[in-house]
Amino acid sequence: MMAVAATALPSVAADALRVNQVGYLPDDIKTAVYIGDTDPAGMTFELASPDAGIVMVDSVVVAPAWEPLKHAARIYFSSVQTPGQYVLTAKLDGKVAQVTPLYIGADAYSRLNLNELPLVYLRQQRCGFNPAHNEKCHEHDGILVLAGDLDGTHVDVTGGWHDASDYLQYLTTSANTVYQMLFAYRENPGIWADEYDAAGLPGANGVADILDEARWGLEWMMKMNPSDTLFLNQIADDRDHRYGGIPSGDNVDYGWGAGGARPVYPCLGHPAGLSKYKNESWGLASSVGKFASSFGLGSEIFAGIDPEFASELARRSSVAYEVGKANPGACQTTSTVSPYYYEEDNWADDMELAAMARYRATGDAAYLLDAVNYGRLEPVTPWMGADSAHHYQWYPFINLGHLELARAGGDAGKEFVRNMRSGLRRVADKAQDNAFMCGLPFIWCSNNLAVALVTQAMLYREATGDETYRELETAARDWLFGLNPWGQTMIIMPADCGVPSPLDPHSAMTDLTVGGRPGRDNLVGGLVDGPIYASKFNSLWGVHLRNEDRFAPYQNSRVVYHDDYSDYSTNEPTMDGTASLTFMLGRLCRPTE
């Protein structure tokens, strides 16, 4: 039975009960949150179901209010473990004031096949041949720029994925997308469907669809590494934003004719750009390290599927690692007509993960020592506990190298378990500030941080058996599935599943019929950016609302989220954020023992 949308009865217009709209696992720390102008001290809360009857909740804890509302409370019902559909009711003076349905069951996530949803979005993001549209795009990519003696040279870099709702392509986010899917497969084997072929078209091919998708990215990454001395970082730039249709019709002219070749930027270890806007690059390791780690894990996963492919990936991983080691520092993306680019300025995490990929492949202790030394340069991913950051300043948002070192055991393993715990503790301290226990900085793509937090908390708990951060983990997960001030699941869900999710995402697909179906259907599985500081929203170029804000009562002076096409800062799905869901959803959809 599907969950249905929450209903707020009009005791006070803005009073609301917020729950995980998808559901709760039987052994979860189960919470709901009340927010409103009515004091919860005078309310009673109860659960009811046809099977369990009326059940009182375990406890109600007053929590910091979500301004502009006056009151908030966390409602605990962890003791309720009988599977089924429930209704959570808030009563005031014996009368029903608020009511919302919720679901409890071991199949809360698997009944909706949530682990496969991100792949729907990623197939729609494919560049070159797009199976969702059944059309080709960007077949002339591309022409090298800022490449010294190679300037103006054509290089075949067709393939990969469009980064978000524009058609730029970045090595940074694409490599992370590849790694996240390979990691999800390695950690959750045996649960992935085979319903599509390598081209992304319906039809099994004997390979799990998540590996077909990862290979699509790996093959593009190989094109972005056309020689052992040339690593490419980006295709196109923000001139792309002049066009707003489907990718096959892209008619932007970068200087080689409308709809022609697009510029391809190499990895450069110094500030660069074609206009007055220059990035602040100062090394290669952040990008080249991502080549090394994704190629390395790819060689491990594909060794038993395509040994020749795996062998070439292993060779390239080794070469890329040495290039990264020789060129420490961060390699950023490039903009031309606006000041917005990915401002990554950390790199040791990328080299740590790359070193562990080499160690797993070779068993050479020198790589393990390298990984430890890189890891000590950044013991905690810097956004954890921070109040703010630049756009993609610390990327990826989770350091999976720490997990690999923790699993290696010995003194180093203990050290990096402590580092994982330190990051969680910093977020937990901030999480005390609001009723939702959300300890994230509300920077651009804050939902990506939530996924990273859930992932790190899951992996730490499984590695140690320590349950200290279990509530932090479930709060961040529940936040993504509607237990947030807006009552909105942040993953674009199928329209007929009954789970409230973005209806008006920022994408060219939203208002179009593509492949004979409403464009939004092609966006299913996409993770939208998520809430952002109101000050940031108000400062961005061109961001506005095209419709009345249906969440107006829950926007505060500090943080906003809008389900609106014109808000590219909070409601745009992204490729890498979506791919990062695959591990978490894979864990949540595993069969129970």
Image (tube, helix red, strand yellow):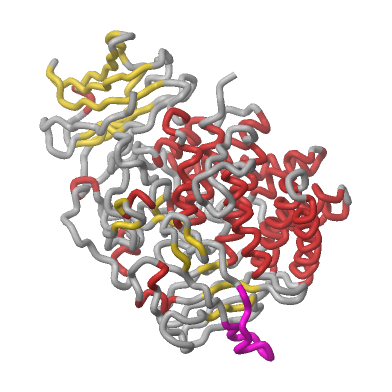
In the image, residue 202 sits, relative to residue 29, either above or below, namely below
Give residue 247's quadrant in the image.
Answer: bottom left
* Residue farthest to the bottom, as pictured: 149
In the image, residue 246 sits, relative to residue 405, either above or below, namely below
Q: Residue at x 34, y 57 (%)?
A: 514
Prevailing secondary structure of the magenta residues: loop
Left or right, 578 with respect to 331, comes to: left
Image coordinates for residue 243, horizontal then vertical, percent: 35, 74
Magenta stretch contains residue 147? yes
Q: Quadrant of the C terminus?
A: top right
All told, the count of numbered labels is 0
**Depth order, front residue of 422/561:** 561
Q: Is residue 70 visible?
A: yes
**Where are the magenta residues, as a range?**
143-156
**Depth order, front residue of 144/269:** 144
Q: Is residue 373 visible?
A: no
Image coordinates for residue 395, horizontal then vertical, percent: 57, 59
